[in-house]
Structure formats: structure tokens, C-alpha cells
Amino acid sequence: MKYPFATFVFVLALSCFATLQILCGQIVAASPLSSPRVGVVRYASSGVYLLYGLPGNYVVGPRVLDGVDDASFSEQGGMVARNGSLTLLGSDLSAVGTVETGETKPVLGMDGDLTTAIAWLPSAQRLVHWNGQAFASVSAPDLSREGSVSSVSKRDSKTAWLLLHSSSGSVSEASVSLETGQLISVTTLAGARGQAFRQRSFVIFPDKQELVITAPSNGDAKRLPLAGNDLKVERVSSDCLHVSSPAAQRDWLLHFHGGNFDLTELPPPPSTETAK
């Protein structure tokens, strides 16, 4: 055989080059700069961070907001509650509008463009929403018989959907006019319990140390074991929900795609941040 040593060196060089490409590819895949933006996530520290990556492999990016009490985000922007006020944010996280509410525990929802932004103010029993030009509000009917509101969203530009849970744990969905505040309908959601959250045709709710994802239209349900009796759900994007347990200091991303979903535990936020 001619030039055996040269052949060996050539093969070894190719092998090293291939290994280097794989390692570089893994590093690039883990870099927020090269990964697609998934959404915006609020951690228990009240800090808000950009989130990058692909299902099963997420990277927490820079801290972009501080002191946020509640939040809801889509690809087109978001709404945050801070110190008794609501702020609507564009896709670049710049402020589009702000309204003072004095509410300490609002329930927020935004799952599409800016006109899907809506909030329930339990202290004032009012709905506040973005009508495309400014914040508008309407007094809601007395829903105390149905329970406490745990999720709010817009069915369309004229109608709000509210999920309520009673003291017995049952869940109902109320439809309210955003023009008059009139109660349109109330429907009991069979199979849902406790503080439920609506994600399009799905309803998500914690049950002991499980997260239950159910489709009220057909009764299908799936239970995912999760540590923590204090699970909280917030929207990260139109198709992604942030599930957190402040007591356990653990966070997960629930990603919906079509009629399926994936659950991935999120890493902690970086120790050094730049915030607004």
C-alpha cells in the first residue's frame, strides 16, 4: 500500500474536522443569538426574560423588564401589570399604552395581536381591553355566584371569555359583552377543576401535583406529573405557556402544536441581566 501514513493522517484530520463541526453546531444551537425566539417569560423574581430555542432545548436570554407582577405575551406584543397599572407592549417591547387601575391582582390575557389584550380587575369588577387605539373598560355583572376569575381572553372584539372556579372547585365559562358589560351566557366545563386557564380549545388546570390538560368539547384529558402544589400558568406566546411553582422554584414550558403539546423544564434565569 502506498503512503499508509499519509492516508492515516488524512483520515484522522477528516474525523477531527467532523467532530469540530458537530461541537460547533451544538454551541451555536445553544446560543440565543442563533436560536429562534420562543416568547417572553416572567420568572418568580418578577423579572421578564426573552426565551429562545426549540422544543426540548430552551435558552433564557437577557432580562428585559423588572418589577412585573403579572404578564401575558404573544408574538405581536404583550401586556404587563406593574404597581397598579397596565402597560401594553409592542413586539419590540416598547410601550404602546398605559392605564392606571390600582389593581394589585389583575388577571391578564393576550393571545394574538394587540387588540386581543384584556384584563380582569377583581377589586373593581371591571374588564379593561385594548380596542386598537386606547384602553377601554366596562363594568362586568356580579359573577360571585360562579366564583373567582382565573383566566380571561377575548372571543372576538365584542366579547370576553372568563373562566371561573367556585369554592367547590367546579369551573364555568362566562361570556360577557365588552360593549355593554351584559352577561351573555354561563357554561359549566365538565372535567375541569380549580384555577383553570384557557388555551384555545384546551383548558389547563393544576390538580394536586399534576397538570391536567383537557378538551371540554370531547372530554379527553391528559395528566402530567409536576412537583408543586402552587402551580401557576402565564402566557409566553400564542402557542406556549409558562407553568411555574414558586415554592419549588421550578419552571416549565408547555408548547402546543396542532392538537399536541410538549412539556419541557426551563433553566433558571441568568445571574447577570440588563433590564428596563
Image (cartoon, rainbow, N blue to C red):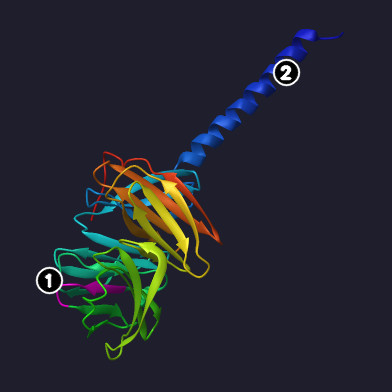
The relative height of residue 35 versus residue 158 in the rendered view (above or below) is: above
Q: Nearer the viewer, residue 104 or 67?
A: 104
Q: Name above or below for residue 10 compared with residue 204.
A: above
Name the residue carrying label 1.
102
Decide if residue 32 is in sight here: no
Q: Is residue 270 magenta?
A: no
| Vertical order, 139 against 247 (above or below) | below
The label number, if any, that marks residue 147 in the structure image: none
Q: Is residue 203 above or below residue 16?
A: below
Residue 70 in the figure: left or right of residue 267: left
Q: Would you say the residues marked 1 and 2 are in contact, meaning their CB atoms lie under 8 Å apart? A: no
For the record, the magenta segment spans 118-124
Q: Position of residue 268 (x, y in %)?
A: 32, 41
* Image quarter (top left, top right, bottom left or bottom right) of the C terminus: bottom left
Where's residue 126, x and y in %? 21, 79
Residue 181 in which image quadrant: bottom left
Q: Which amino acid type is shown beneath numbered disc 1?
A: Gly
Name the residue tied to disc 2: 10
Q: Residue at x 61, y 26 (%)?
A: 19
Q: To which quarter of the image does residue 145 belong?
A: bottom left
- Residue located at (36% from left, 66% from top): 77
Question: 184 or 249, which is in the foreground?
Answer: 184
Residue located at (36% from left, 64% from top): 197
Closer mark to the observer between disc 1 and disc 2: 1
Q: Residues within 10 Å of mark 2 (few under 14, many from 20)?
A: few
| Disc 1 secondary structure class | loop
Q: Residue furthest bottom?
A: 180
Asked whether, in this view, residue 271 is left or right of residue 35, the answer is left
